[in-house]
Image: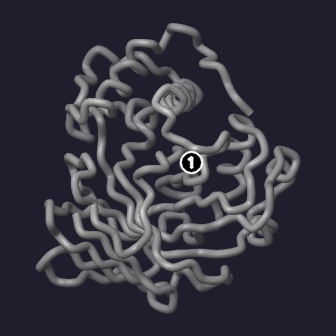
Amino acid sequence: MNHAFEHGDSFAPLVQALCDARRQGLAADARAHMQALHCEEDAYAVQRAVGARLELFADAVPRHWKSGGADRSSPLTHAPLPDPGVWTSPARAGAWPLRLRLVEAEIALRLGADVTARHADQMTHESAHAFIDAMAVSIEIVDTRWRQALEELPALLKLADMGVHGALVLGEWMPYERRDWQAQRCRIRIGQRDEETFTGTHSLADPAWLLPQWLRDVTRQFGTVPAGTVVTTGNWVGMLAGNAGDLVQVSFDGLGGASLRL
């Protein structure tokens, strides 16, 4: 489903700033756009406009997404992830433009069937599991096209910037199974620092919990979501700072791991 830019020229300066930042690899000044967006729908419209203008997605429905929220009572937000920045582990960032290099450890889920708007509307947190065919350990690098520090940016400007996404690394896919996520252990090591361990720290207590809302939003924006679409489902470790050249190693007990040379 090909959406026009619903708001006409009202967000044109904001879209132009984000496009220029991506093309030129230079951070844009957010000060002129602090009050430009009023709701999540505005931010999603900007995401679509930037994606379309820069041809960031090879398919009509982006094939990789991020979704998540602070907890089950908080709003969930979603962003499509540009195709060139999705890599298979082991990966190297190389010359990929990154400023912040903030590291998150996550679980990615892959759909095993097409999901229509009707499917999404009827989906419950329980029935969602039947639509998943595989899962993988993933590493997300958080980054922004804005010059300002993340804590200085309005949430909607971060959401418009593809959810301040930099790159995604996917580990080996394995068949999906329901697990005791509260007992799930995650380990991460960045560079020469000591390994850190986190247990049961997923913000939603179950990575699949977000599927119904994510799929309702995506089908509303783009239409049917095809089998094979991937969503990474929220952070287990906080945002940990890495430096250029660091080796990031993430593993989840029983689920394998992923690595990235920053």
| Residue 226 position in % (x across, y down) | 74, 54
To which quarter of the image does residue 236 belong?
A: bottom left
Q: Quarter of the image containing the C terminus? A: bottom left
To which quarter of the image does residue 261 belong?
A: bottom left
Q: Quarter of the image containing the N terminus? A: top right
* Number of other residues with Cα within 10 Å of mark 1, as a class: few under 14, some 14 to 19, many 20 or more: some
How is colour applied across the structure in the image? Answer: one colour
Residue at position x 22%, y 52% in the image: 95
Is 156 located above or below residue 226 in the figure? Answer: above
Residue lying farthest bottom? 254
Is 103 located above or below residue 251 in the figure? Answer: above
| Residue 34 position in % (x across, y down) | 33, 20
Residue at position x 33%, y 69% in the image: 91
Residue lying farthest left? 192
| Residue 242 position in % (x across, y down) | 19, 63
In front: 182, or 129?
Answer: 129
The answer to whether 241 appears left or right of 154 in the picture is left
- Picture mark count: 1
In front: 249, or 181?
Answer: 249
The answer to whether 43 appears left or right of 16 in the picture is right
At label 1, the amino acid type is: Leu
Report helix, strand or loop for mark 1: loop
> Label 1 belongs to which residue?
76
Residue lying farthest top? 9
Residue at position x 74%, y 71% in the image: 129
To which quarter of the image does residue 237 belong?
A: bottom left
Residue at position x 45%, y 32% in the image: 160
Is 34 located above or below residue 222 in the figure? Answer: above
